[in-house]
C-alpha cells in the first residue's frame, strides 16, 4: 500500500474496495486545470465545463489500457459548439473550447449553471483511443442525453458491454484570496464493476448488492469534498469506503502539456496543396495558432518554400 502524500495533486489515485470486486480511480486536478484555463480566459460557464471534461478524461483514460492518446470531444449546435480534452498514456493533458461569445454571455444572464442541453444544444459526446498510424482507432459515441456531463457518460456506460461504471465529476472556480484556495480545481470519482467470475446465482446477487452499496456511498461525496485542496485523496476514500476496506495503489501523475511544435505545424502545412497555402496567407505570411495552448507560429515565404516532404502522419497533432 502506498503511503499517502497529503500535498499531492494533479494525479489519478487508483483504489480497490477490498470486500468487493470493485475498482476505482480518484482524480484531483489543481495547478494542471488552472494552467490550461489560464491560456484561454474563457467565460465561467465554458471554463467550468472544460474543467469537468478534463477530470472526466483523466478518469476514463485511466480505466483503459492504451499507449497513445485518449480524446474526449463534445460537439453540439448550442452556445458552446465544441469542447475537446485529451490525455496521453504518459499523463500529458490539454483542452480547449469553441463557442459563440454573445450566446454564452446571454445564457449566463439567464442561468448561472445551465444544463448540458442548454449549453451545448443537440449533439454528441465521443471519445477516441488513438495508438498510432499502424493501429485501428477505437471510438465510442453517445448522444448528449442528460443534464450533466456525468449523466451523459452514464448513458454510454448503459450501452457499453465492456465498461460498467459510475462516475462523479465536479469543478470549482477560484475562491478567496489565500494561496490554499487560489486557482481552478476539478475532480472525478469513478467506480468500475468487474464481470462476475462464475455462474453462481448467489454470488451474482451478492455482487449486485455490493455494487449498489458502493454507488450509494460514492453518491454521498459532495462537490466541495471532491474539489477541496485541504482534503487528501486518501482521507476522502477512507471516509467513503472504510467500512468495506479500501486500498490505494501507486498514483499516476498528470501534467498540463501541449504537444504542438513548429515541426508538427510544418508537417501539416507540407501536406496541403499550393492553392490551400495561398488562401491561408496574410500579406505573404501564414500564421498558425494552436487551439490548445494559444502558441502562434509564423511562416514566411522562405519558410514555406523550405517545407519538408509530408510524412504519412502529417495530420496527427
Image: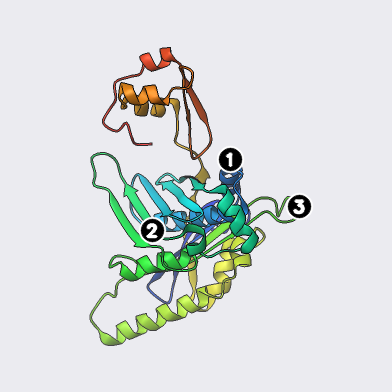
- Horizontal arrangement in the rendering, residue 148 relative to residue 164 (left or right): right
Name the element at disc 1.
loop
- Horizontal arrangement in the rendering, residue 155 relative to residue 44 (left or right): left
- Horizontal arrangement in the rendering, residue 245 relative to residue 124 (left or right): right
The residue where tag 3 is placed is 178
Disc 2 versus disc 3: nearer the observer: 2
The residue where tag 1 is placed is 39
The residue where tag 2 is placed is 124
Pointer 1 or 2: first along the chain:
1
* Disc ID at residue 313: none
Residue at the image point whose x is 33% and y is 53% from the top: 65
Q: CA distance from mark 1 to mark 2?
A: 26 Å
Q: Residue furthest bottom?
A: 202
Residue 24 location (% of width, % of height): 44, 65
Residue 173 location (% of width, % of height): 64, 55
- Horizontal arrangement in the rendering, residue 122 relative to residue 310 (left or right): right
Name the element at disc 2.
strand
Residue 5 seen: no
Question: How many numbered marks, from 0 up?
Answer: 3
Amino acid at each position: 500500500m502506498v503511503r499517502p502524500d497529503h500535498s499531492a495533486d494533479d494525479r489519478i489515485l487508483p483504489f480497490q474496495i477490498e470486500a468487493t470486486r470493485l475498482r476505482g480511480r480518484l482524480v484531483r486536478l489543481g495547478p494542471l486545470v488552472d494552467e490550461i484555463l489560464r491560456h484561454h480566459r474563457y467565460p465561467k460557464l465554458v471554463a467550468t465545463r472544460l474543467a469537468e471534461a478534463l477530470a472526466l478524461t483523466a478518469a476514463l483514460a485511466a480505466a483503459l489500457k492504451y499507449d497513445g492518446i485518449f480524446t474526449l470531444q463534445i460537439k453540439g449546435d448550442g452556445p458552446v459548439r465544441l469542447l475537446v480534452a485529451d490525455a496521453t498514456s504518459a499523463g500529458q493533458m490539454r483542452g480547449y473550447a469553441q463557442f459563440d461569445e454573445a450566446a454564452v454571455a446571454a445564457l449566463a444572464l439567464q442561468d448561472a449553471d445551465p444544463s448540458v442541453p442548454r449549453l451545448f444544444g443537440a449533439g454528441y459526446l465521443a471519445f477516441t483511443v488513438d495508438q498510432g498510424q499502424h493501429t485501428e482507432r477505437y471510438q465510442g459515441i453517445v448522444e448528449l442525453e442528460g443534464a450533466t456531463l456525468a449523466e451523459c457518460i452514464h448513458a454510454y456506460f448503459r450501452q457499453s458491454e465492456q465498461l460498467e461504471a459510475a462516475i462523479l465529476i465536479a469543478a470549482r472556480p477560484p475562491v478567496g484570496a489565500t494561496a490554499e484556495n487560489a486557482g481552478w480545481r476539478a475532480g472525478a470519482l469513478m467506480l468500475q464493476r468487474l464481470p462476475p467470475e462464475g455462474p453462481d446465482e448467489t454470488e451474482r446477487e451478492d455482487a449486485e448488492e455490493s455494487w449498489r452499496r458502493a454507488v450509494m456511498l460514492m453518491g454521498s461525496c459532495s462537490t466541495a469534498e471532491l474539489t477541496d485542496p485541504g482534503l487528501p485523496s486518501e482521507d476522502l476514500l477512507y471516509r467513503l469506503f472504510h467500512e468495506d476496506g479500501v486500498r490505494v495503489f501507486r498514483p499516476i501523475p498528470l501534467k498540463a502539456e501541449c504537444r504542438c511544435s513548429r515541426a508538427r505545424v510544418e508537417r501539416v502545412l507540407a501536406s496541403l496543396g499550393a492553392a490551400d497555402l495561398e488562401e491561408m496567407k496574410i500579406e505573404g505570411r501564414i500564421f498558425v495558432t494552436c487551439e490548445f495552448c494559444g502558441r502562434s507560429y509564423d511562416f514566411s515565404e522562405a519558410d514555406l518554400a523550405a517545407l519538408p516532404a509530408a510524412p504519412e502522419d502529417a495530420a496527427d497533432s
